[in-house]
Image: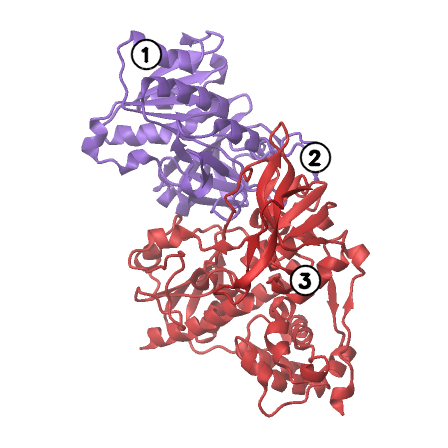
Chain colours: A red, B purple
Amino acid sequence: MANRIPRTPVREQNPQRRATNFEEVCLGYNEEEALLEASRCLNCKVPKCQGDCPVHIDIPGFIHRLAEGDISGAADIIHQDSSLPSVCGRVCPQESQCEGACVLGIKFEPVAIGKLERFVGDWAITHSDEKEVKKAAPTGKRVAIVGSGPAGLACASDLAKAGHEVKIFEALHKVGGVLVYGIPEFRLPKEDIVAKEVEAVKRLGVEIETDVIIGTTMTVDDLFDREGYDAVFVGSGAGLPRFMGIEGENLNGVFSANEFLTRTNLMHAYDAEYDTPIFAGKRAVIVGGGNVAMDAVRTAKRLGAEAVIVYRRSEAELPARVEEVHHAKEEGVEFRMLTNPVRILATDDGWVKGIECVEMELGEPDESGRRSPRAKEGSNFTVDCDVVIMALGTSPNPLIKSTTKGLETNRRGCIVADENGVTSRPGVFAGGDAVTGAATVILAMGAGRKAAAAINNYLLD
Amino acid sequence: MYEIVSKRILAPNITEMKVRAPRVAESARPGQFVIVRVDEIGERIPLTICDYDPLQGTVTIVTQTVGHSSDKINHLNEGDAFLDFAGPLGRPSDLLDLSDEELRSQRILFVAGGVGTAPVYPQAKWLHEHGVKADVIIGARTKDLFTYVDEMQGVANVYLATDDGSAGYHGMVTGLMKDLIDNQGKQYDRCVIIGPMIMMKFAALTTKEYGIPTMVSLNALMVDGTGMCGACRVSVGGETKFTCVEGPEFDGHLVDFDEAMRRQNMYKNNPKLVSEPHKCQCNNG
């Protein structure tokens, strides 16, 4: 029986070694390992994995091809629903999506769907020259895409395939959005993976212009009136960092996770060759429990700091992917659960010298279904540190909202759009974190693709 | 790539560059800034826009060498190019919100210190185009360090001050401000101060004494310049603001300058730096 084969372990860099470098942690499957793992799939009649995939990739379909050794065929199946398999195979929270639904997981370990997707995606990248680019005849319609993150890239490639002329405007100097400024190199290699995925989008004829901030360099109205676009997709992400509003947050040595990660990822501050500085301190406390907190704490560790996670709920509630928490622990990150900061303490010259916290306990479930934490009175204590990094989530940038007439937003500043990305303004579509608030790469990609379909209909009507 | 179409040395270590950046030139307004990057390994450096010409497609910046990155900028020559030149960023000056009538009823004083003179210029020029001739105090340590005096004289009433008395009023800008108001019968409804943080702090204290509403243009550390990183946070009236999207101009009587100065020096000569020390992120005005 296929399901008696144990889940094929994936090779990883040794934790002690990798905690001092920025190379990728997970080394992925080779062909032999991938084919063996693929052979574990039961090919269920009603594939629950597919249902729990946000973009409904035909998972048994691609795994079946892979098990037969037809990697190219497997890639074709994935590409019907996903534009970024190498990325999603690495960063998707599979345990709460496809792998969480895998029937094998009930009694045994689920099929390593993420690792298989990654294998197929990486194979497709290295064999991209062999694939013919299929594109519909030119429609003469032009679409502007705001932001080159996962939503924008996915939307752009679908629209280009449909024959439209597509141009992406990116505010930063590098293409990829959160894939280049947010997610660290050790989880998602920039040159080998992100840049290659971007190349694939460009090969479809998509033009990309960097250093253009829609909202200031040009407005959405300019895109229609001055630049003559027929439709606009806004995938500008959720880039604004939140802070706690506690005493001492503006001390030297307090950073948002966004700043800390942008300095390392986008600006290569960890590389002595590059000009951008970064300060990780001797002991860095990262406040938060999501993937961004894990990225920040593991980055601080790699920069030579003792690195501590402070999170107000318990480990069971950590929103981060299980794999990231596991990797962080292996690398020597200290976890302080049920701990909430109340103020940051200063040295005489205005640098961080510690963070005062309170112990928390969990009460009744709140609207998120998680038990809500509350402070134990009088439990205050101090954690010594010289750096504090706030990883408390992000909200959408108001630049587009404030400069686009007739574009409805909600009270959280998110653009209001239906499930097809249709906004309150005709011809303007939106998707990804700009609509949902901070979410995942796969959801953003899915939103970009749905919007592409809606834009296609809109343009051809 | 963004070509440098002309370069002028204004004073020792201070250069002016006209950069071809048509999209920025088209949208730029007085008070806004750009983020530039010299090369692939370079920092993203915020620089206030000193002039712009939508017809020529050029934007003018003035840079003073204060560290590694500004030195790199000042070593570029005519014909060289910036790898990145993004903007305009930040909110335009508040003056742009006023109607022509309101503008004409206002007596406006600019106080420019050091390399801060250049970014005052587009505001004074804009006012001049709207029929208002403002007073501009330009302060420097010594007369050789003056920049943009001729340009400014074409659009405003200029008053000079030097610390060493080599030109104009002998003393600090704050002394000249008091002299104009106390001894020369000047009255002002508004003041805009741009210059080194310490000069802005004391000039703002002076206008506070006289009850003159005052804006200052902050040159905080930044990475992206679009609101993403929060490196540029500043306390204004007890509230945290992001200089890049909510500024760069803030109420000078509410800014916590001591915190702003401390934050500005976060990466300066700090032995605690993980990467090598003394890599300035310098915004020269």
Labels 2, 3: one chain: no
Amino acid on which disc 1 is placed: Leu
Calculate the distance from the C-alpha at mark 2 to the C-alpha at mark 3: 28 Å
Residue B9 visible in this rendered orientation of the protein: no
Q: Where is residue A406 in the image (x, y as percent from the top left)?
A: 29, 59
Q: Position of residue A445 (x, y in %)?
A: 51, 69
Task: Judge whether B275 appears above or below A183 on screen.
Answer: above
Q: State the residue position of label 3.
A: A324
Horizontal arrangement in the rendering, residue A47 relative to residue A240 (left or right): right
Task: Judge whether B239 appears above or below A156 on screen.
Answer: above
Q: Which mark identifies residue B272?
A: 2
Mark 2 Cα-neighbour bin, 10 Å: few <14, some 14–19, many ≥20: some
Labels 2, 1: one chain: yes
Q: Do the residues labelled 2 and 3 touch (CB within 8 Å)?
A: no
Helix, strand or loop at disc 2? loop
Calculate the distance from the C-alpha at mark 2 to the C-alpha at mark 1: 46 Å
Calculate the distance from the C-alpha at mark 3 to the C-alpha at mark 1: 64 Å
Amino acid on which disc 3 is placed: Glu
Horizontal arrangement in the rendering, residue B187 relative to residue A287 (left or right): left
